[in-house]
Amino acid sequence: MTIRTSTSTALLSVRDVCVDFSPGMIARLLGTSPIRAVIDVSFDVAAGRTFGIVGESGSGKSTTARAILGLEEASSGTISYDGTDLRALRGARRRAVAREMQMVFQDPSSALNPKLRIGHLLTERVKIHRRREYGHRNEIIRNALDEVGLPHAHLERFPHQLSGGQQQRIVIALALISQPRVLICDEAVSGLDVSSQAQVLNLLNDLKSDRGLSLIFITHDMGVARYISDDIAVMRKGLIVEQGPADEIFTDPQSDYTRSLLAAVPALPHSYRFTDA
Ligand SMILES: Nc1ncnc2c1ncn2[C@@H]1O[C@H](COP(=O)(O)OP(=O)(O)O)[C@@H](O)[C@H]1O
Ligand SMILES: [Mg+2]
């Protein structure tokens, strides 16, 4: 494996993490061995930087994210956040850290209760994660909408009355109310058309610079990965085959697998940029 490390200090540090899925009972009886979904994965994410994870479907990207969030148990390795070993945290302290790491998935409609208006959804989030400031909820909610670039009139709408891109921006507004330091985006723009993709990517970049948010951006799309990432890991079959600064990975890939992923991207010009005009 080729590792080219950056010099910045890490907010999140993943070291030698493995995640194994044990087979179901019948499969066990048939002698099937556990699936090693993530194998000895190590990387650092600095404050205010975007770490991209690319790789084909089934390569272990989502499982890595889920292990960081504590949604899957790592069978070995350490995950430290702000100097604390996450696997040792329990109860209220674990929940407090979980709040600082918010997740954005591919399908925004599955994250938004279809029966509730946007205003209601955002209010609920304030109630849960900003309880002491509940008296200021209208201001908090309006600020969150401003940050994601949506008009306040959308508070009256139901999720189905918004486009996919607008729904994804509401998902991000909900995350922002929780005051995250890390945003984990798992194929967060993969279901959107190109112009909505551009809007959401530019929004994420703005949040990174304005709020100093760290992003983990998981995608199978090399064009998107190149646009958004400062550093990149390329995963294949549970392993990181190559990682380093995005510019180097894209201009001088060391592994054959990375080269094959890049070759599969139809004519990606060097100055490839998303515009949301
Ligand atoms: N809950 C699970 N039980 C068993 N196997 C799983 C589970 N979740 C994921 N896997 C397997 O782990 C591997 C990695 O999956 P995943 O992390 O979802 O990949 P990616 O996000 O890169 O597409 C795949 O082989 C997948 O089938
Ligand atoms: Mg996935």
Image (cartoon, grey):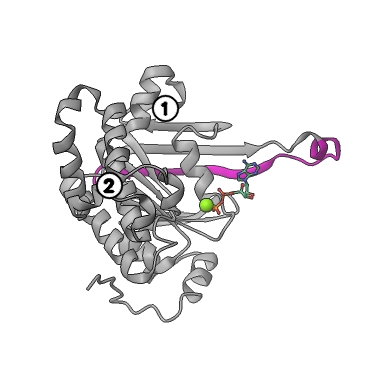
Identify the residue under disc 1. Answer: 86
Q: Secondary structure at mark 1?
A: helix
Q: Please tell me whether residue 181 belongs to the stretch shown in magenta.
A: no
Q: At label 1, which amino acid type do we have?
A: Leu
Q: Nearer the viewer, residue 274 or 176?
A: 176
Q: Residues within 10 Å of mark 1 (few under 14, many from 20)?
A: many
Query: Vertically, is 151 above or below 64?
Result: below
As drawn, the label of residue 111 is: none
**Residue 15: x, y in percent?**
46, 37
Q: Earlier in the sequence, mark 2 or mark 1?
A: 2
Visible in this render: residue 214? Answer: no
Q: Residue at x 31, y 60 (%)?
A: 228
Visible in this render: residue 165? Answer: yes
Left or right, 191 with respect to 209, comes to right
Q: Residue at x 42, y 27 (%)?
A: 86
Q: Nearer the viewer, residue 262 or 100?
A: 100
Query: Vertically, is 22 above or below 253?
Result: above
Where residue 196 sits, quadrant-wise, is bottom left
As drawn, the label of residue 7 is: 2
**Residue 101: x, y in percent?**
35, 37
Q: Residue at x 20, y 22 (%)?
A: 132
- Foreground disc of the pair 2, 1: 1
